[in-house]
Image: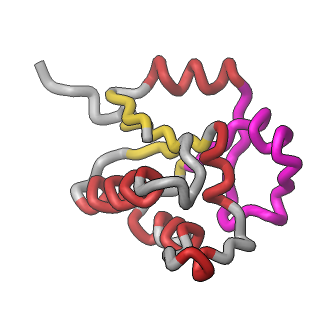
Amino acid sequence: MTPNTNKPLLVILSQSPYNGSLAREAIDYCLAAAAFEQHIQLLFIGDGVLQLLTEQRPESISQKNVAKTLSALPIYGIDKLFVDQEALDRYGLSDEQLCLPISKVTPSQMADMLANATHTLNF
């Protein structure tokens, strides 16, 4: 049986940007998978929406800026970026505060994304 290559690999980012290494590992995984022409969708939920903030100052904790790495995603053909609208509202975030253009989704749209993905990776 041949896998359906029209369906995306859904990568869910739910961790805050500097609480451990999962946020950076997820982005690195996506960049590597995209280099092998995988169809990837990224979904930022919960604390993961904080990765999208433009005004990050991680130098004070000796970390690299996650938002700068995220800006490389379109170069690798990763342009299907989604964010949980409820999480944005919970943090009081607006489009102007985000480092990339991103589509907002509702819980029912997220359920559809999960149902239509070939695989789901949760970071």
Left or right placement of residue 109 versus residue 3 in this view:
right
Residue at the image position 41 percent from the left and 27 percent from the top: 117
Image quarter where the N terminus lies is: top left
Q: Residue furthest left?
A: 1
Which corner quadrant holds the C terminus?
Answer: top left
**Quarter residue 83 falls in:** top right
Would residue 117 be found to the left or right of residue 64 on screen? left
15 over 57 or under it: above or below? above
Q: Position of residue 14 (x, y in %)?
A: 55, 41
For the point 60% across and 75% down, which residue is it? 58
Residue positioned 61% across, 58% down in the render: 51
Q: Position of residue 3 (x, y in %)?
A: 20, 27
User: What is the magenta range?
Assistant: 81-106
Going 42% across and 51% down the picture, which residue do you hit?
Answer: 22
Q: How many marks?
A: 0
Which residue is outermost to the front?
A: 61
Is 88 within the magenta?
yes
In this rendering, the answer to whether 11 lies above or below 108 is below
88 w.r.t. 114: above or below? below
